[in-house]
Amino acid sequence: MSLTATPPKAPADGEPSTAIANSLTAGKLPRFSSLWVLAGCLAAASALFGILAAADGSEFNIAAAVFVGVILYAVVIWVLSRIVEGGRRAADRLVTALVSIAFTIALLPLISVAFTTIVNGLPRFDLLFFTNSMRNVVGEGGGALHAIIGTLMITGMAALISVPVGLLTAVYLVEYGRGRLKHGITFFVDVMTGIPSIVAGLFAFALFALVTGDPGIRSGFAASVSLAVLMIPVVVRSCEEMLKLVPNELREASYALGVPKWLTIVKVVLPTSIAGIVTGIMLSIARVIGETAPLLIVAGFTTSMNYNLFAERMMTLPVFVYTQYMNQGADTQAYVDRAWAGALTLILIVALLNIVARVVAKVFSPKFGR
């Protein structure tokens, strides 16, 4: 019995040669067909909604166009795959498309908010808006420099208060905490996570009113304390989860070399989890930078510049947007334009902070490999 493979028989003279089909490439859509189909479906949906918007004079609905486009993509890619690749591959592509649709639905509010804010905020997104305050301005003109400075100062002070407290609390819970005290701290951190923002503002207002004896106190530092109350539980929870992800083998290796526990935490645990810690801190800042209720209570609002956190009222971007929209003067459009420009500025500040956080995390995270 021979085990050698029989070579294919060459066609005789005059017989037609049959092409050998490649089973690895036959019956497959082109490599980038999914992207081209998606682009075509989005373009068709956008054209449809553009025609409808032009017909009745309404605004272009980008969220509806994207939703209809991805639904159309799921149908078209399934039909094409069914014809070319067969039922099994078509089912796989259909499930992938459904997952993409679910992701798109979750992303639609963000797309809608970003698109609306950019379109409405660009008319006043100019140099004057970033170099002037609203002092003595009752109509057109003016800017949000005083609100931008106030937001950065108040949020920065809140981060200086909450980040050390939250990080050290997380280190205690992960590395040192035991028994009832640990469970009690965890319970109260969970309770603080659900505190309404206005309650934090009332707490800071009552605290500083009792300490200073001034029932009408307004200051940027009090606003920072109220925001720190909201930031601390987010910092604790995010840092705690990141510290738990550090493998115990790294700690044990450090202890085996005779390194004390506090130095192991500083030199091994924290550097290993620095990327996640920075991300959690940025999430906590994004959580509070747009708060309005506590700032209205303890920081108030003003039209002038104030660089002193410990005295007088201080304007912030969320309060600026609120007051411009709610207290419109004779020139209504000027106030609305300033409100949209303030909202766009706030979004860009949050985006810039996240970019900086990712750069910092990448630079300071531990490098693996040789």
Image (tube, rainbow, N blue to C red):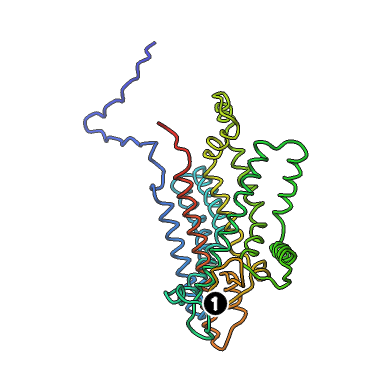
> How many marks can you see?
1
Name the one closer to the observer, 99 or 264. Answer: 264
Please tell me which residue is depicted at 45% across the width and 35% down the height of the picture: 368
In the rendered view, would you say 19 is above or below 189? Answer: above
Left or right: residue 121 compared with residue 14:
right
Among all residues in the image, which is located at the extreme left?
13
* Residue highlighted by disc 1: 304
Q: Position of residue 171 (x, y in %)?
A: 63, 41
For the N terminus, give its image quadrant: top left
| Residue with the most extreme right position | 180
Left or right? Give the position of 296 relative to 39: right
Say if 140 sits above or below 218 in the image.
below
Closer-to-camera residue (354/121): 354
Residue 30 falls left or right of residue 140: left
Residue 135 drawn at (x, y percent): 53, 81
Give the amino acid at mark 1: Ser
Q: Tell me the quarter of the image containing the C terminus.
A: top left
Q: Is residue 320 above or below residue 21?
A: below
Mark 1: few/some/many CA within 10 Å (<14, 14-19, 20+): some
Q: Residue at x 67, y 36 (%)?
A: 176
Identify the residue at the far bottom of this view: 330
Q: Residue at x 76, y 41 (%)?
A: 181
Q: Residue furthest front?
A: 212
Q: Secondary structure at mark 1?
A: loop
